[in-house]
Image (cartoon, helix red, strand yellow):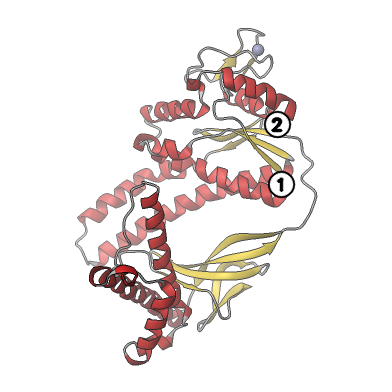
Amino acid sequence: MKSIRGRSYELKPNNVQRTHFVKCAGIARFAWNWALEERQRLYREKEGDERFTNANKQHRRLNALKKTDFPWMYEISKCVPQEALRNLDNAYLLYGKARKAGRKARLPKFKKKGKARDAFTFSTGAIRAEGNHVVLPRIGRVRVKEHARKDGRILRATVSRVADRWFVSFLVEQDILDSAPPSGPPIGVDLGVSIMATLSDGRVFGNPRPLQLRLRKIRRLTQELHRRRRGSNNRKKTINRLARAYRRTVNIRRDALHKATTQLAKNHGEIVIEDLDVQGLIRNRHIARAISDVGLGEFRRQIEYKCRWCRSHLTVAPRFYPSTKRCSSCGHIMDDMPLSERTYKCESCGLVLDRDLNAALNLVAVSSTETLNACRDLASTAPARVSRAGSLKQEMNATISHGIGG
Ligand SMILES: [Zn+2]
């Protein structure tokens, strides 16, 4: 079995390489804008099928023009403009799909220098990761800040700039070894806001809440940015500082999530999670930041692919399974489990347990087939409002109204 994964590293380009990167980014932007202009013109002026074009046709036209009109394109790898045209193709494709599905969509726009993220992609030529450096077409060896792993076949490399730093991300194809699934016992995972995940064996993964801790700094820098004169050096400095603060928060969050999901997928034969409607929750702008800050959607994405790699089984509890209100010991379901109540006290059997741990235990109870059927019955009899997603939403609002959630 093959798997495709992404790997990214920060680059340490020298001055010559930096200049070459800027040139590549400029040519990618130029190719995008040139192709977009042509597409818009064809759409305006032609009729029928001639109103539309694609990346292949545009690439042939651009190649013909290269010799006469754009000879400076020969200074860089030929994939750079080609990939820019493909990106534009994709952007149109996504636009079409979104329109078809009835979602809001925006047509691709022209790229302005210094506005959008500078990025360009290589898909052919010498692309390698070799420990303390990577090899890129026409540029050669570029040093990296961390160790660039050699395993797998690199399909594409995208170089991008964030503030004043350059990064490369590889799309790597790897063989998955047919090893046995992890032998550890099934585990239930209850996701939350103040604590990222509570496990049914009593362990917890804390939530670094990086964005919230850095919110004040980011807010201060944003205000500073508004004071700076447009085009001034100080404004550029503030933009860089702001980008760095954001990047740091993203890194802390991703790191915490990776640690938790790897730990789980590597050590447990079956993992049970709740079925959160993350997209639905994010649509509520009051809780969107709290949700993105924990990265609940990202947790789900990571645990899914890591379970595939490790051959451990991922079970998603039914959407309306009352993991919060159910007693993990006797199965009694409470009418109400207010958020302020951090401890579960069973009215029926007298169990007293931490709220999140009780929920995690309820989730792990879904793991075997036998109980799964029992839970299906439960889920069908439970009123729709007992949705766990709903209770999380409540929890979010409570956190926010207490001023912790920003
Ligand atoms: Zn009970």
Secondary structure of residue under mark 1: helix
Displayed quadrant of residue 202 = top right
Q: Residues within 10 Å of mark 1 (few under 14, many from 20)?
A: some
Indicate which quadrant contains ligand 1: top right
Q: Amino acid at mark 1?
A: Lys
> Residue 266, labelled with which disc?
1
Relative height, residue 328 to residue 172 (above, below):
above
Given residues 234 and 2, the one toward you in this image is 2
Relative height, residue 158 to residue 301 (above, below):
below
Residue sitting at x 71%, y 24%: 371
Q: Is 262 left, or right, of 113 in this rendering? A: right
Residue 232 is situated, as x and y percent measured from the top left of the image, at 22, 66
CB atoms at circles 2 and 1 under 8 Å apart? Answer: no
Residue 184 is situated, as x and y percent measured from the top left of the image, at 77, 39
User: For mark 2, what is the residue?
Assistant: 367
Residue 112 is situated, as x and y percent measured from the top left of the image, at 28, 68
Q: Is 357 left, or right, of 404 in this rendering? A: right
Relative height, residue 165 to residue 256 (above, below):
below
Relative height, residue 85 to residue 356 (above, below):
below
Secondary structure of residue under mark 2: loop
